[in-house]
Image (cartoon, rainbow, N blue to C red):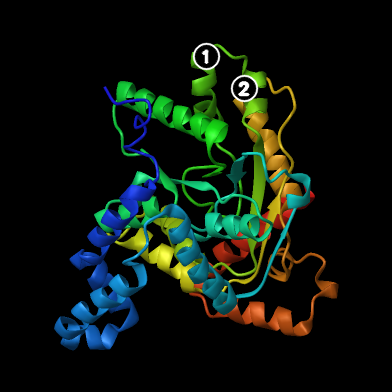
Amino acid sequence: MLSDIDKFSDIRPYNDDEIQPAIQRVINNEEFIDAILSFSFPKLAKYLGFVLKPLLRRYFLFKWGKINSIDEMQRVVGVYVQHMIDSTTTKFTYSGLENLDPSQNYLFVSNHRDIAMDPSFVNWALYSENFKTVRIAIGDNLLSKPYVSDLMRMNKSFIVKRSVTGVREMMKSLSHLSDYIASSLKEESSIWIAQREGRAKDGFDKTEPAIVKMFYVNGKKQKIPFAEYIKSLNIVPVAVSYELDPCDQQKARELYEKAEFGEYKKSEFEDIESIVSGIIGKKGHVHVAFGEPLNGDFADADAVAEEIDAQIYQNYYLHPSNLIAAEQDVDNISAQNIAAFKARIQAIKPELQDTVLKMYANPVRHHTS
């Protein structure tokens, strides 16, 4: 039996003493080096890969070879995040943190638009106001590559086992996850988790009550009443809004093919490609709105999900792109903004344009309904 100290070793982020071994595994992983070369030097990689590979390894050893703690890794990641914000956004803003206490741990339940960027922007807002950065829930469907798993767990990510099959194993996995979240909140860290499995590809942010039920598994085992346990979690709804979604066409293609042909088959590396597109793609203005901690006497998971949704809809920052797509309140939007967004839509394949427009328009409709 695992000791209490290490009973979450299969899903938790890495500890300080595991950082450097993980870095060495990543640097020596051929797939990781090939991926970086193909992305950074697509033409040279084909012909000069044998020269570039050892040089790239030496570069990473120089940059990462002396990192021996989570805090050091966070500082390194922070440099990359700052560069990403500077190069891919026109503005980054946030609101609501004045209502939260930096000394408290919170369970941030966020809408989900981008695989990597949603928690990154949440973390950057928290870091900017001297809050602790969060531990990030990530599905094991994104961790099929060992180097991806190492990279994520070095950066305070913990694993949600979605690939588990069989009722008994699923219940065991959910209980383990619920215990980990409770333990983390009680002792060490805030948590970020998406309100649903998978991104909201249609722009309709909707919390899955199953997520809330998972939270309560730990409370149920302790025979704590539902309403009391939910209050103890310090759940804070979070709305992340992007003026421009770098993955809008990819999402629209999936929705279109499902509607037209009844199914959509992902390519082998599609999730990784989506992560890269989300990181390097132009986003315009990004806003993170933190809601207020849930402190009502909720009867069940559905009631909690409804309150999370209500706060996300109310706090969602509406960009010109949303209003133009919904054809609402456009009088105060500059002609230049309108022309730029319409040009973006026109550049998309004709059969996908309506789907993309609905994706941007849906937050307006839910905000005003």
Whether residue 206 is visible to the viewer of this picture, yes or no, is no
Label 2 vs 1, first from the N-terminus: 1
Q: Where is residue 56 shown, x and y percent of the image?
A: 26, 78
Q: Nearer the viewer, residue 232 or 365?
A: 232
Q: What residue lies at 75% left-to-right and 27% top-to-bottom?
A: 296
What residue did someone put label 2 on? 229
Q: Nearer the viewer, residue 274 or 363?
A: 274
Q: Where is residue 315 shown, x and y percent of the image?
A: 74, 51
Q: What residue lies at 32% left-to-right and 74% top-to-bottom?
A: 62
Q: Is residue 330 left or right of residue 75?
A: right
Give the quadrant of residue 34.
bottom left
What residue did someone put label 1 on? 222
Q: Is 349 situated above or below 76?
A: below
Residue type highlighted by circle 2: Tyr
Give the quadrant of residue 65.
bottom left
How crowded is the residue under tag 2: few (<14 C-alpha within 10 Å), some, or many (20+)? some
Q: Is 56 situated above or below 301?
A: below
Q: What residue lies at 17% left-to-right and 85% top-to-bottom?
A: 51
2 and 1 marks in contact (CB < 8 Å): yes
Q: Nearer the viewer, residue 154 or 259?
A: 154
Residue type highlighted by circle 1: Gln
Q: What residue lies at 53% left-to-right and 29% top-to-bottom?
A: 215
Q: Nearer the viewer, residue 353 or 156?
A: 156
Q: Is residue 187 left or right of residue 266?
A: right
User: In the structure shown, which secondary structural element does the residue marked by tag 2 occupy?
Assistant: helix
Q: Is residue 351 left or right of residue 21?
A: right
Q: Is 363 situated above or below 168?
A: below
Q: Where is residue 89 shown, x and y percent of the image?
A: 61, 74
> Quadrant location of the N terminus?
top left
Q: Is residue 106 left or right of residue 166?
A: right
Question: Which residue extends farthest right?
Answer: 331
User: In the structure shown, which secondary structural element does the residue marked by tag 1 occupy?
Assistant: loop
